[in-house]
Amino acid sequence: MASKKGKPQKLPAQPQQPQLDRLTPGWTTLRQASPVTPTPARPTSSASASAQGDNAGSSDAVTAPNSPTGSPPNIDISEVTAAMAGLPPPSAPSTADGTPFANGSVAPGKGEEFMVRVGPNYSKTGKKEPSRSAMYDLVAVDIMRTQQRIAPITQLFSPPKLSPRAAAFQHESVPRLFVLNIQLPEQPASIFGKDDGPSIQIVMFFEINNETMDALADLDKAEPAYKLLVEYFARAVAEPKFRGRFKLIGKVMNDWAAAGLPSLLEGYNAKPVLITNSGNMFEGPNKDYKEMSVNVHMFSFIARKSLTSLRDKFRQVDAEVGVVIESRTDDEMPERMLCCAHFSQIDPFMCEELLPEVQDWLFNNAGASAGVASNSDGSATAAAS
C-alpha cells in the first residue's frame, strides 16, 4: 500500500471485534478506588541491530516480592477485597474495535495472519502456509510498568469472565485459561544485561474456544496440532526442554518504510522467536490456568538493542502478536496458532506504573482467593509452580 515515506500509514478500519475487558483483575478496582498518577517514562536511547532470541546458558528465577501486612494509603480496602473475592469489578469501557488504552487499543488477533510449518518433509522443503484460526481466544489484557518484573503475575488478577462452556471446561492438562505474561526491559539495552529490572508487563488472558474443546472431546480424530497441544501443556511446567518449543511471533501490519521502522530489522518481521531459557510456565490452583512467563531481559544483547531501536515507533505500529508450539516431525504438522492478539498504536512505555507498595499489598491480600501460597519468609508464589 503506497504512502509517503516517513509518514505513519493508517490501515483500513478493522472489522468489528468482540468486546474485551481491559482488566478484570483486582488492581483495576484498586486503581479506580485510589487513582495512581502515571510516573514519567524513563529515558532511553535509540539504536538498530538484528533480532535474536534467548541468551544461551541463562536461567529464570521466579520473582516473589516481600508482602508486608497492612495497606497502602488511600486505598478502599472493601472494593479491592470484593474484586479479589471474585465479584465483578468495574471495568473500563470497551469498544467494538478493541480494548482502549490511553494511547491505542488491543483486540483479538487472527491466527490466519501467521505462516506456520506444514509437512511432509518440512526439514527439506521449509514449506509454510497460513495457520488456521487460533486455539484460544483473547478475553482480557493489561499493560503496566513495574520496578521489577513479576512472574508469575496471574495471582494479582481476579479471574476474567469466560464463556459458560469455557468456564465449565475440565481437562487433566489443558487449561481453560492461558495467560501470556511478557516482561520487556524498560531501560536501554546494556551489554552487561541482567535478568530483572524496571519492566513493561504485557499480560494477555486467553480462553479455550469451542473448536478446541470439540477437538479435545475426540482427540483420536483431531488434527495433529491439538494432540501436540495436549502433550505440551502436560509436560511444559516440569520439562524445560519441551517447554522450549514455545514460539513467539510479532508481525507488523503496516508498510515497514512508511512506519519509519529500521530497514535492518525488516527481514525479521513475522519470524518466530523460540523461547527457551527465558520462558517459564506456572500452573494455578486446581489447574484453573497456566501462565507462560517470557523474560525479555534474558534475550541476547542484540535482540534487546533491536527492541530499544523500536521504542519511539510503537505509536505508529499495528501489529499481530501470536504464539505457536513448534512442530518437529510430520506427525505433528501442520502447526496451528495457539493464541494471538492485535495491538494498534500502543506505546507500552507510557502505561501506568504498579507501585511496589501496591504490588506488595496485592500479593499479601490476594493470596487466599487468587491461589497464592504464603511462604515462611513472607513472600508469595503461585501454587503448583
Image (cartoon, rainbow, N blue to C red):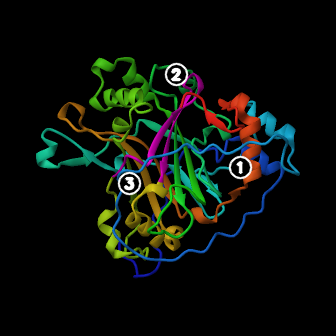
| Disc number lying in front (2 or 3) | 3
**Residue corresponding to mark 3:** 54
Question: Does the CB distance between marks 2 and 1 fall below 8 Å?
Answer: no
Q: Residues within 10 Å of mark 3 (few under 14, many from 20)?
A: many
The answer to whether residue 217 shows anywhere in this view is: yes
Q: Quadrant of residue 285?
A: top right
Q: Secondary structure at mark 1?
A: loop
Q: Which residues are magenta?
A: 273-295
Q: CA distance from mark 2 to mark 3?
A: 34 Å
Question: Which numbered disc flags the more N-terminal residue, 2 or 1?
Answer: 1
Q: CA distance from mark 1 to mark 3?
A: 35 Å
Q: Secondary structure at mark 3?
A: loop
Q: Secondary structure at mark 2?
A: loop
| Disc number lying in front (1 or 3) | 3
Residue type for callout 2: Phe
Question: Does the CB distance between marks 2 and 3 fall below 8 Å?
Answer: no
Q: Is residue 243 left or right of residue 156?
A: left
Residue 50 x %, y %: 33, 68
Residue type for callout 1: Ala
**Residue corresponding to mark 1:** 92
Question: Does the CB distance between marks 1 and 3 fall below 8 Å?
Answer: no
Residue at image x 28%, y 39%?
335
Residue at image x 40%, y 82%?
5
Residue type for callout 3: Asp
Residue at image x 34%, y 29%?
226
Question: Which numbered disc flags the more N-terminal residue, 1 or 3?
Answer: 3
301 versus 20 height, above or below? below
Question: Which numbered disc flags the more N-terminal residue, 2 or 3?
Answer: 3
The dot on residue 169 is: 2
Tell me, yes or no, whether the highlighted magenta stretch contains residue 40.
no
Q: Is residue 164 left or right of residue 241?
A: right
| Disc number lying in front (2 or 1) | 2
